[in-house]
Amino acid sequence: MHAPTEVRHLSQTIACPLQRAYAHLCVPEHFCQWASGLASGLEQVDGQWFASTPQGRLRIEFSPANSYGVLDHWVHVAPGHSVYVPLRLLANGDGSELILSLFRQPGMSDQQFEADAQWVQRDLQAARQLLESL
């Protein structure tokens, strides 16, 4: 059993209705439009998604489309080791709230965790700009 780890919940308010925002964000190919770690693109091979990342070619597993706003994904960084990325889209008035829970990875320094949090916040802002332009 693993002890709880530090987590930050990062969010971005988006002036785009939930249904329209989710319809765009739940398509795996669209992650590359705002998630800079996947900016080099995704490719689907035999039903699995792969991304070229700064860490090399990694398999990405996306949650299936659903009616709950769940956009979770798993980044398989090594055999037997995956990074779980909880991502939710919630209704917020006539718009949406995009929330990512960033878990501190084992061995990650304070500076690395802060840098990751800033990177995620930039990506959430990019998602807002994209969705508000649709």
Image: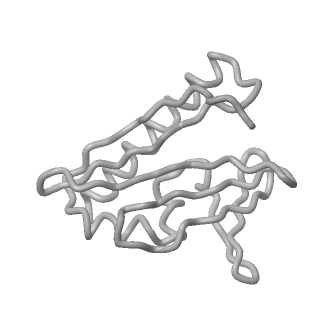
Q: Is residue 127 above or below residue 24?
A: above
Q: Position of residue 132 (x, y in %)?
A: 24, 56
Looking at this view, name the residue that lies furthest to the right.
79
Residue at the image position 53 percent from the left and 30 percent from the top: 7
Across and down, in percent, residue 85 comes to 57, 48
Left/right of residue 9 with respect to residue 32 in the rendered view: left
Most extreme residue toward the bottom, as rendered? Answer: 46
Of the 4 image quadrants, the one containing the C terminus is bottom left
Q: Which color mode does the image show?
A: one colour
x 36%, y 39%: residue: 11
Quadrant housing residue 133:
bottom left
Residue 93 in the image: state x and y as whole percent: 12, 52
Q: Residue at x 37, y 43 (%)?
A: 125
Residue 22 in the image: x percent, y percent?
A: 34, 66
How many numbered marks, from 0 up? 0
Q: In the visual, does 58 lie left or right of 4?
A: right
Indicate left or right for 38 with 55 as reference: left
